[in-house]
Amino acid sequence: MTRPKDLDPSSNPRALLGAELRHARERAGLSQESLGAPLFVSGSFIGQLEAGTRRMHLEYARHFDETLGAEGFFARNCRALAKSKYPDHFAEAAEAEAVATTIREYAPQLIPGLLQTGGYARAVFCEGRPTATEETINELVTARLDRARLLEDPTTPVLWAILDEAVLHREVGGPAVMAVALRHVAALARRRRVIVQVLPFKAGAPMAMGGSIKLMAFQDAPPVSYLEGFGIGRLEDDPSTVTAHELAYDLLGASALSPRESVALIDSVAEDYSHEEQP
């Protein structure tokens, strides 16, 4: 049997690793469920690994090497892919985000990372990490703007963001930074590149407004949801849990302003910030 070559990190290594896993599993005559059972993971989880939407951890890679006779291929490449420019709690979600076809996100506190400008991102990191070096801040800002390049594709992924009204009024970086940041969001919506809604204060307290929700759908894998808090994050793939999060998001959307009303409100608040900046 010909031994597979190590993956080229300049391509899409996680997708290639997943494709090799699918090929090796099918060659061994195993179903996704039977391959995942000894690891106590579902067949859908194996499918997400094969589609490149989930990160392969070393314990899984070793099991695949042993079960599929891969001679250490998965463990070697798993170690190579473990390095990430994102914090540990967010790395897997960022990698899934990069291959998602649809992203729906509710932001209760800050403009979502994919919609942030460089000035806004810098202010977020400087205020959140007051003792960080300039080099660290620059690396964080660069990584965030690199993520936003997903939106350079004219159609994929579809991004639908619901911003709590508090996001518009939380002054991050000063009036000038806020004016630019909000106009950037409005411009993306006007170009029909993203869908944006604002959840107004008068909407009360919908069930999900206590924390952020990110829902991601993929072409060849089941959907996942991501919940994030201070320094922590959790990627969920349990179907019933994801369904509950989808319902919560839909209820938020039903309580939010229409996209047209939302863009008008964002423009209005941005204009207010511009006037604050003028002497």
Image (cartoon, helix red, strand yellow):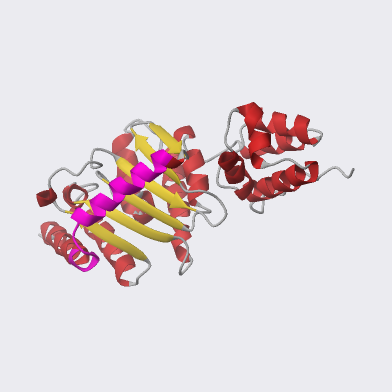
Residue range of the region highlighted in magenta in the rendering: 240-261
| Main secondary structure type of the part rendered in magenta | helix
Q: Name the one closer to the observer, 235 or 42.
A: 42
Residue at figure coordinates x 34%, y 42% from the top left = 244
Q: Position of residue 262 (x, y in %)?
A: 20, 62
Q: Position of residue 205 (x, y in %)?
A: 15, 43
Position of 21 relative to 35 (above/below) = below
If the image is split into quadrants, where does the N terminus sit?
top right
Answer left or right for 118 relative to 51. Answer: left
Answer left or right for 69 relative to 87. Answer: right
Q: Name the one closer to the observer, 249 or 128.
A: 249
**Residue 245 part of the magenta-drawn span:** yes
Residue at figure coordinates x 39%, y 59% from the top left = 159
Residue at figure coordinates x 21%, y 68% from the top left = 260
**Residue 103 part of the magenta-drawn span:** no
Residue at figure coordinates x 18%, y 60% from the top left = 257
Position of 170 relative to 136 (above/below) = below
Q: Position of residue 142 (x, y in %)?
A: 45, 49
- Name the quadrant containing residue 116: bottom left
